[in-house]
Image (cartoon, rainbow, N blue to C red):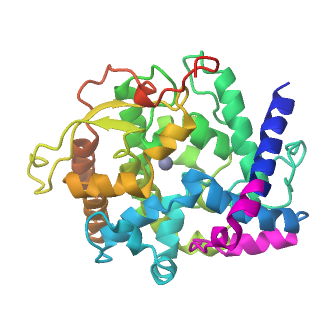
Amino acid sequence: MQQSKARARFRSHAILLAALVAASGAAAFQVLPKVSDVDRKISTLGRNPVLDYLGHWFVGSAIPIMKSPVHESITLAAIGCGAGLGAEDECVTIDAVKEHRILLYGVRWPDDPPFLLNTKSPPRIKGCDASVTLRSTSQPLCWWGLFSDAGVQAEKKSHIKAPAFGPGDYMLYRSHYGDLQFMHAMGTYDGETAGDTVDRMKMWAEFLWGVASGITPTGSFIRDLGNSQLTSYFPGDITATNLFATGIIEVRKDLDKVAMGALLHMVQDSFSNAHTERGVDTGASCGTTGFAKPGQIQRFRSYTKQSSTSHDEADTPNALGLHTTQISPSAVDVSRTFLAMWKDKKSWAEASVFFDCVFEPRDRTIEADAGPYVAIPKGSE
Ligand SMILES: [Zn+2]
């Protein structure tokens, strides 16, 4: 039942793909800079080179989280690309992407973590080749099939007051619909308290800061790093190298940048209204740090009952432009501060003071919900 529903959905997207290609012609093949070309090359060695060729276009142009380079815009603006406020999308040029490729790979990682498919029981989804590391750029149609399946399964479990997916499930399921949604500054289920969400975010940030600072060993199993909460998320034989760079050898010598990128992703998502509701920016500063304090977190959102369409509208370049022209400090400013502290080799003890100021919720007991992005139940539309 689940399979056939997922397949039906998948088929309708394949039809949509064909229609889009026919309707928009050459203009649709506008080339957006790609962060990693190496895993695209891998796809030509797999079993589905033609499907994957079409899939690259589909995933890169039709899937909102993949087509809008909002995280890339914010990150490049934070580095200092010189574009005016509200014009951060102009920062995304091929040269800039090439120059900051590894950091941007990290910024994109929580949306598109590479992982291996189960070779004993590979997904029965078109375009999936278990011998190729899965990422949107290496097996785009398989990626989309799994993403859709995760959504269908999560919906069925939406009444449970617990994450829909956890250790043992694919990273794509866990990151977008499961226990790792804190990586996107969101509750992991409807009803999770803000205190729980922010504690998980802080655990994650501390781990990322350790890798970014070169202090945390990237070749040790995460479960041996001495953090029991982190171990509960990654109990198996998995190192930071596996987590960030399964199948992507080219980034392994720069995992510090990848980790920093993943931290920036969480920071940036916490300024998206579909992820986190913040109060107004008051002009206050973060204690004695000298940095400005962003609007305080009122509550985290949960994706479980959100409409993916209205969620994605909050993450577009236009939404970003409205944000940076009207709010200070913005996602760009806070990203810039974390980047500056990283370059200055600040310890986690120092960086965590700023982290607490940026992420402290107004009320730790308030529960995550869909907010104004709630999906309208079918039949009442
Ligand atoms: Zn995200």
Q: How many marks?
A: 0
The location of residue 209, given as percent across then percent down, is 39, 56
Q: From this viewpoint, which residue is outermost toward the front? A: 23
User: Per the image, is 181 magenta?
Assistant: no
The location of residue 309, given as percent across then percent down, is 55, 40
Toward the viewer: 189 or 140? 140
Q: Quadrant of the N terminus?
A: top right
User: Per the image, is 30 magenta?
Assistant: yes
For the point 81% across and 61% down, which residue is it? 132
For the point 30% across and 71% down, which residue is it? 343
- Vertical comparison of 196 with 184: above or below: above
Q: Quadrant of the C terminus?
A: top right
For residue 168, say whether it is visible.
Answer: no
For the point 65% across and 25% down, which residue is it? 155
Going by the image, does 78 lie left or right of 153? left
Toward the viewer: 234 or 317? 317
Going by the image, does 209 lie left or right of 323? right
For residue 58, say whether it is visible.
Answer: yes
Residue range (magenta): 19-45
The location of residue 64, given as percent across then percent down, is 56, 52
The location of residue 214, given as percent across then percent down, is 43, 66
